[in-house]
Image: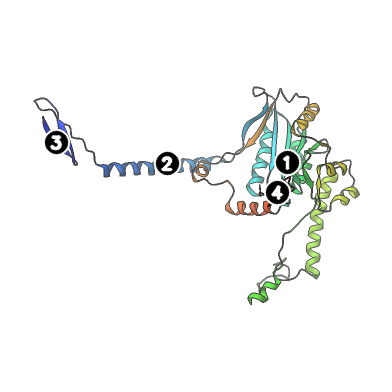
């Protein structure tokens, strides 16, 4: 027997004519670098594939998911969810879900599921506008969960005049009004010894500035904007809640939140009930048995890049803004605790 060394490792080889000598290269240092290069190559290829997918197709196209009923049924009822603050990517995904339900011939009816404290006025109206077009083609009822307030109630009006609105016993709704968050920092200038001095083309270009009191013509300007926006909101309610006239809507459009029973008494909702109650009523309207149709949800999967990096489809600014808004939402709690503070969920 002959002995050979390959990179510090001794290998015993058989002797004799006609036999081949095999030398095994077992360099731990080289093997480590090969593994590192393979991992880097894999990551690069995954990112390149993800970039290719995102460039040539919409990475946030809503996907269909079974929710309830008969999974083998052809006829479908789509649950379109309006959850969380109505803003940014959330608005985009809701609009895409509406469009998907509109294009699917097998979707025979829509259950609009609302759990939102509202959000941007333009976002809310955009969703309302698309829902109106959809409800003109397919029967739509509304199911309100924890919140359907302000913009959350606004989008519910998109179900149209034929819709019934169901609110759960603990739902908070209403909050019919408009708000422009603003801080008054006039006292801060004196304390810090600084003064705001913008260069502007007109007197209202920096309005409403937090560095001066809102008075005179400037206050009138913003009062008019608020009044116009509120008029759009109340007009949408008058149009779609046919049992309420303009005076009645104006009387309840104080910005206050209503409980489910208060909302029912004021004509803002039609019935107190749960999702199954709304589906049963919708089935009677559209002519289907909830147990014999496929009830589906829409959801948006993260892209490969988002999944690998652990990021959200929302930008960091959107996430921070939404977290801030969520923290300001009033909450009623049945809580046995020496520290009665909301969770911010």
Crowding near pointer 2: few (<14 within 10 Å), some, many (20+)?
few
Q: What's the CA distance linking mark 1 and mark 3? A: 76 Å
Q: Which of marks 1 and 3 is nearer the N terminus?
A: 3
Q: What's the CA distance linking mark 2 and mark 3? A: 40 Å
Q: Dots 2 and 1: beta carbons under 8 Å?
A: no
- Residue that extends furthest to the left in the rendered view of this protein: 17
Q: Name the residue under label 3.
A: 4
Q: Which of marks 4 and 3 is nearer the N terminus?
A: 3
Q: What's the CA distance linking mark 4 and mark 3? A: 76 Å
Q: Dots 1 and 3: beta carbons under 8 Å?
A: no
Per the image, label 2 sits on a secondary structure element best described as helix
- Numbered mark located on residue 20 in the image: none
Locate residue 292, reporting x and y percent: 71, 22
Quadrant of the rendered image containing residue 328: bottom right
Q: Earlier in the sequence, mark 4 or mark 2?
A: 2
Location of residue 217 with respect to 280 vertically, above or below: below
Q: Mark 1 points at which residue?
A: 114
Q: What's the CA distance linking mark 2 and mark 1? A: 40 Å
Q: What's the CA distance linking mark 4 and mark 1? A: 15 Å
Location of residue 270 with respect to 324 vertically, above or below: above
From the viewer's side, name the closer residue of 94 and 48: 94
Quadrant of the rendered image containing residue 27: top left
> Which residue is drawn at the image coordinates 86% and 50% (left, top)?
252
Per the image, label 1 sits on a secondary structure element best described as strand
Image quarter where the N terminus lies is top left
Locate residue 190, reporting x and y percent: 67, 76
From the viewer's side, name the closer residue of 196 and 181: 181
Q: Which of marks 2 and 1 is nearer the N terminus?
A: 2
Per the image, label 4 sits on a secondary structure element best described as helix
Q: Is residue 301 left or right of residue 8?
A: right
Q: Mark 2 points at which residue?
A: 45
């Amino acid at each position: 027997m002959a002995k050979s060394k390959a990179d510090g490792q001794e290998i015993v080889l058989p002797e004799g004519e006609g036999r081949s000598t095999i030398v095994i290269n077992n360099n731990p240092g080289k093997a480590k670098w090969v593994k590192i290069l393979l991992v880097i190559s894999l990551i690069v290829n995954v990112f390149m594939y993800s970039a290719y997918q995102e460039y040539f197709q919409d990475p946030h196209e809503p996907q269909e998911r079974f929710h309830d009923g008969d999974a083998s049924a052809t006829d479908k009822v789509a649950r379109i969810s309006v959850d969380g603050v109505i803003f940014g990517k959330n608005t985009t995904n809701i609009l895409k879900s509406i469009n998907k339900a509109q294009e699917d011939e097998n979707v025979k009816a829509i259950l609009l599921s609302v759990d939102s404290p509202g959000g941007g006025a333009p976002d809310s109206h955009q969703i309302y506008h698309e829902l109106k077009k959809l409800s003109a083609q397919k029967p739509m009822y509304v199911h309100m969960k924890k919140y359907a307030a302000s913009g959350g109630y606004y989008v519910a009006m998109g179900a149209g005049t034929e819709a019934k609105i169901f609110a759960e016993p603990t739902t908070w709704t209403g909050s019919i009004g408009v708000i422009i968050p603003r801080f008054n920092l006039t006292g801060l200038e004196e304390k810090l010894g600084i003064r705001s001095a913008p260069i502007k083309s007109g007197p209202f270009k920096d309005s409403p500035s937090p560095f001066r009191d809102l008075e005179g013509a400037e206050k009138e300007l913003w009062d008019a904007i608020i009044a116009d926006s509120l008029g759009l909101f109340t007009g949408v309610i008058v149009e779609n809640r046919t049992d309420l006239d303009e005076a009645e809507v104006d009387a309840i459009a104080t910005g206050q939140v209503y409980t489910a029973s208060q909302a029912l008494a004021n004509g803002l909702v039609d019935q107190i009930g749960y999702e199954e109650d709304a589906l049963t009523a919708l089935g009677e309207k559209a002519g289907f048995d909830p147990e014999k149709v496929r009830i589906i949800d829409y959801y948006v999967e993260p892209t490969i890049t988002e999944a690998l990096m652990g990021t959200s489809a929302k930008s960091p600014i959107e996430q921070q803004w939404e977290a801030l808004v969520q923290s300001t939402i009033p909450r009623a709690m049945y809580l046995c605790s020496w520290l009665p503070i909301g969770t911010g969920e």
